């Protein structure tokens, strides 16, 4: 698709220099043994704001700064909001984060700690978003959307460049999928450089908006539900301009996972890789553990190139992380106990 060019991605990479890391790509011994092909983890958990969102936000904000923009607004208190606040501060742009009165105090503090102004408004995320859009229309703030924006997509696409440079013979890339900014960017860059690479998107069963939209052939709404992969929640926008079409064109496979599987991914990352990852970031590992990638791997049995799982972020509430780990340990103790009772 010609809306984006590989030159845009290389330009994005220049803007990211010194602002976001070229992240490590490490081989996982445990997962390679399981897949019987080398499996690598691309660790976006090391980014200064704890997720890859810093790439897209930095590229979009650097472009805005080039145009003389001084003030941006967002309604995200999650990984996108953090990335915008961090990148804007580095570029000398002021950030306002609109959030409802229901947003917990620790999140409000986290926003302020990044140097952004917390603007408390209304009683829901929709109210906060409406206010951010009003400020964009009426007060001259710039709005950086979380995924459906070409500069954001080009920023995320730098991940694809890094993977192809480090592993030119990569056969499979597995990408956590929500609004599709990450998927569209990575798939665009990867397939441009190596058309044979297979791209798999992974979402949670609970409220997978892109999957439902691909099935319907157009953007559709889904009910948002609570999930351990909270960074994958939210819709793709009924007026989606770029990520839906790009994802539809470039995706080879979509996998949906249940909550127990996502939890297993988080636990595996912790126990075998010594990594604290959020649910959204663990879905690639989870898909592999579940056997959900078996078909993908088998189709490649002749070439058997490496598989890359993008580990997108580390921003899980630390108490929640402990609960997930403890629950898994409890289950294991019970099943070990059951096994020895049987014996
Ligand atoms: C935003 C996000 C995703 C999904 O990215 P999209 O561009 O919305 O598809 C995956 N993982 C984490 C940690 C995220 O913050």
Image: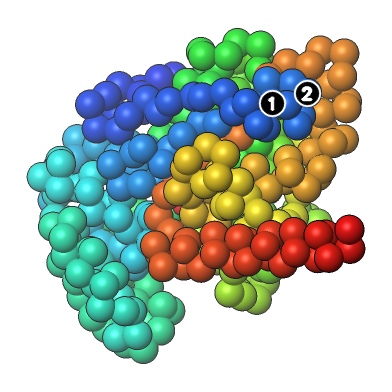
Q: Residues within 10 Å of mark 2 (few under 14, many from 20)?
A: few
Q: Position of residue 304 (x, y in %)?
A: 79, 16
Disc 1: which residue: 32
In the drawing, what numbered circle is on residue 84? none
Near-viewer residue (286 or 189): 286
Evaluate whether residue 20 shows in this view. Answer: yes
**Mark 2 vs 1: CB contact within 8 A:** yes
Disc 2: which residue: 36
Residue 16, located in which quarter of the rendered image?
top left
Near-viewer residue (148 or 314): 314
> What residue do we see at 89% from left, 58% from top?
343
The tally of labels here is 2
Regarding mark 1 in the picture, which secondary structure is present there?
Answer: helix
Q: Position of residue 254 (x, y in %)?
A: 76, 46
Q: Position of residue 158 (x, y in %)?
A: 44, 27
**Rendered view: 83 above or below 8:** below
Residue 38 left/right relative to 164: right
């Amino acid at each position: 698709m010609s809306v984006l060019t590989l030159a845009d991605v290389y330009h994005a990479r220049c803007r990211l220099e010194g602002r976001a890391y070229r992240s490590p790509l490490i081989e996982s011994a445990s997962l390679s043994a399981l897949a019987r092909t080398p499996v690598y983890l691309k660790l976006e958990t090391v980014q200064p704001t704890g997720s890859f969102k810093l790439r897209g936000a930095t590229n979009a904000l650097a472009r805005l700064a080039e145009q003389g923009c001084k003030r941006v607004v967002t309604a995200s208190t999650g990984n996108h909001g953090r990335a915008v606040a961090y990148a804007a501060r580095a570029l000398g742009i002021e950030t306002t984060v609109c959030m409802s009165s229901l947003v917990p105090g620790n999140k409000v503090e986290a926003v302020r700690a990044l140097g952004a102004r917390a603007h408390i408004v209304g009683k829901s995320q929709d109210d906060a978003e409406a206010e951010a859009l009003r400020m964009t229309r009426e007060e001259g703030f710039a709005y950086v959307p979380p995924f459906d924006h070409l500069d954001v997509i080009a920023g995320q696409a730098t991940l694809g460049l890094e993977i192809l440079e480090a592993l030119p013979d990569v056969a499979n890339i597995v990408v956590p999928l929500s609004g599709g900014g990450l998927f569209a960017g990575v798939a665009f860059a990867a397939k441009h450089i190596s058309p044979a690479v297979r791209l798999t998107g992974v979402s949670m069963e609970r409220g997978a908006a892109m999957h439902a939209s691909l099935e319907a052939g157009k953007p559709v709404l889904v009910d948002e539900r609570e999930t351990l992969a909270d960074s994958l929640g939210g819709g793709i926008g009924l007026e989606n301009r770029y990520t839906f079409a790009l994802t539809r064109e470039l995706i080879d496979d979509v996998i949906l996972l249940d909550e127990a599987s996502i939890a297993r991914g988080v636990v595996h990352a912790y126990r075998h890789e010594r990594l604290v990852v959020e649910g959204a970031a663990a879905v690639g590992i989870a898909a592999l553990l579940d056997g959900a990638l078996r078909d993908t791997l088998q189709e490649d049995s002749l070439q058997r190139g490496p598989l890359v799982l993008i580990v997108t972020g580390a921003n899980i509430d630390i108490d929640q992380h402990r609960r997930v780990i403890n629950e898994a340990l409890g289950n294991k103790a019970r099943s070990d106990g059951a096994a020895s009772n049987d014996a």
